[in-house]
Amino acid sequence: MRGILLVALLAACAKDAPEGGGGHDHGHVHAAPHGGALVALGDEFAHLEAVADAAAGRLTLYVLDGHAQKGVRLPDASLRCTVRPAGFPLELLPVARATTGETAGDASEFSATDPRLEGLERFTLVVERVAVKGREFSGVEIPVPEGDH
């Protein structure tokens, strides 16, 4: 009889437990490799990392794999974003790197320099649309400097 009660109790607890896909209740955390704000796309399918340099008015966005370790190259000519709460648009352009062979149209790093970013320490970067390995994500919010990890 006790065994049946224990099984029923475990089943009830499992039913109330949150499923993966939202937040990070599954017990592991990834470190942002560039020291920025890291957010997951999907259920750890990929990650975006935003690195802000308020003194220079520069923002760099890295597209990373599910473990937030390796860059994932995108064919995009740019990534359109919005900086909130200020509400201004920001276009991030691909960064070519001779050391990795990345070029415009085949890059995992996107960047912009804008005087409106100067002195801006805390904001939310909203990535309008990004397609990573065949999956599309829209309205991705990255709280800078915290991230979601």
Image: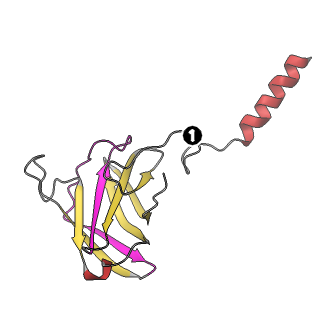
Residue displayed at 19% across by 54% down: 107
In the picture, residue 104 is in which quadrant?
bottom left
Q: Which residues are magenta?
A: 57-85
Q: Position of residue 8 (x, y in %)?
A: 83, 28
Residue sitting at the far right:
1
Above or below residue 144? Residue 136 is above
Which quadrant does the N terminus fall into?
A: top right
Q: Position of residue 17 (x, y in %)?
A: 69, 41
Q: Position of residue 122 (x, y in %)?
A: 43, 72
In the picture, residue 126 is in which quadrant?
bottom left
Above or below residue 58? Residue 4 is above
Residue displayed at 22% across by 50% down: 73
Q: Is residue 2 left or right of residue 37?
A: right
Residue sitting at the far left:
98
Q: Is residue 56 left or right of residue 101?
A: right
Pick whichever, 48 or 11, lies toward us. 48
Q: Position of residue 22 (x, y in %)?
A: 56, 51
Pick whichever, 105 or 95, lies toward us. 95
Residue sitting at the far front:
55
Q: Which residue is mark 1?
A: 26
Residue displayed at 32% across by 55% down: 131
Residue displayed at 34% across by 78% down: 119
Q: Amino acid at mark 1?
A: His
| Label 1: element kind | loop
Crowding at dot 1, Cα within 10 Å, few <14 / some 14-19 / many 20+, comes out as few
Q: Is residue 92 left or right of residue 106?
A: right
